[in-house]
Image (cartoon, rainbow, N blue to C red):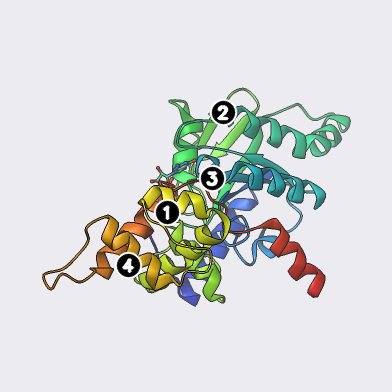
Amino acid sequence: MTIQWFPGHMAKARREVTEQLKMVDCVFELLDARIPYSSSNPMISDIIKDKPRVVLLNKMDMADPGETKKWLQHFEAEGVYPVMLDAKNGKNLNMVVKAAEAVTKEKFERLAAKGLRPRAIRAMIVGIPNVGKSTLINRLAKKSIAKTGNTPGVTKKQQWIKVGKTLELLDTPGILWPKFEDQVVGKKLSLTGAIKDSIIHLDEVAIYGLEFIQQYELETLNKHYNIQVEADSPYIDIFDAIGMSRGMKNKGNEIDYESVVELVVREIRNAKVGRYTFDRVKELESTDEAE
Ligand code: GDP
């Protein structure tokens, strides 16, 4: 489901997450491993404040493994606990529990020192639409949904899902809005399927994606589409080459650009051309330095 966000929606989402946060010991911030910066909510730190946080880089199966490693190091250096994940195929689920234990260790030691009985860690998932929140909850839930009835302070009925012996997860994730302010971020969000096709012009998205692969993996691009373009070929030549190679022509025997655009976006979105990470740690760090 893709939501059109307006200020009212954002305020409501923030209110709901803030309310749910009162019930948990830590937060799982779910990000798309292909765009860890662009898929983060712009106000996440303000919203979760000093609650222990785990960053889950989901869809690792579609991201560039080398870049994912760099992102993990980047988060570690920032003092955030990161885990890479493939919720769809259930990879690294045990790491999620371990991470929750690690970030809440101090709190539980403090509680134990006060003589309080040990209890399960309570956590919730937050993230922008389509990042994989429901998929992860379903994966972690298996069949063990623990009914606890109404939780005070929240109008909707909340349930806790038992994940092993040590973790309880809120069954409803916090849905937060994506970044809007930047055109490039918008293209990356569209290219990874996080926002509706109608928000950003699909031509722009296809051009961005093709030029990215042209810059980083020219050989793969040529091989995948069975074309021969150069590192400095203009995008229109790449469209033409793909259209020719795939026989995408309209009645007048001209390249059917609309079909080429749709094909390219769909294939990049589903990692059919290769595994790419569109947010590079390096770029992020160089903007930090510039500030
Ligand atoms: P939500 O809006 O955050 O709850 O996102 P969903 O759980 O509905 O997932 C959005 C899409 O991403 C679905 O088509 C999922 O199958 C897919 N998805 C979720 N996690 C992964 C993953 O780790 N790898 C891949 N390849 N797809 C995933």
User: Which image quadrant for residue 249?
Assistant: bottom left
State the residue position of label 4. Answer: 240
Residue 151 circle label? 3
Q: Which residue is mark 1?
A: 268
Label 2, label 3: how far apart the Cα atoms are: 19 Å
> Which is nearer the N-term, disc 3 or disc 1?
3
Q: Is residue 203 left or right of residue 180?
A: left
Q: CA distance from mark 1 to mark 2?
A: 34 Å
Residue that lies at the very extreme toward the top in this rendered image: 165
The residue drawn where x is 62% and y is 67% is 42
First in sequence: mark 1 vs mark 4: 4
Q: Earlier in the sequence, mark 2 or mark 4?
A: 2
Quadrant, the C terminus: bottom right
Rendering quarter of residue 261: bottom left
Could you tell me how far apart the alpha carbons at marks 2 and 4 are, in whole angstroms? Answer: 51 Å
Which mark is in front, 3 or 4?
Answer: 4
Is residue 200 positioned above or below 52 on the image?
Answer: below
> Residue flagged by tag 1: what amino acid is it?
Ile
Relative side of 226 to 73, left or right:
left
User: Is residue 176 at all visible to an observer of this figure?
Assistant: no
Comparing marks 1 and 4, which lies closer to the viewer? 4
Q: Residue at x 26, y 68 (%)?
A: 258
- Secondary element at tag 3: loop
Residue to which mark 2 is pinned: 163
Q: Which of the two discs, 1 and 2, labels the residue nearer the N terminus?
A: 2
Residue 14 placed where, x, y %? 57, 64
Question: What is the CA distance from the residue labelled 3 to the residue labelled 1?
Answer: 42 Å
Callout 2: SS: strand
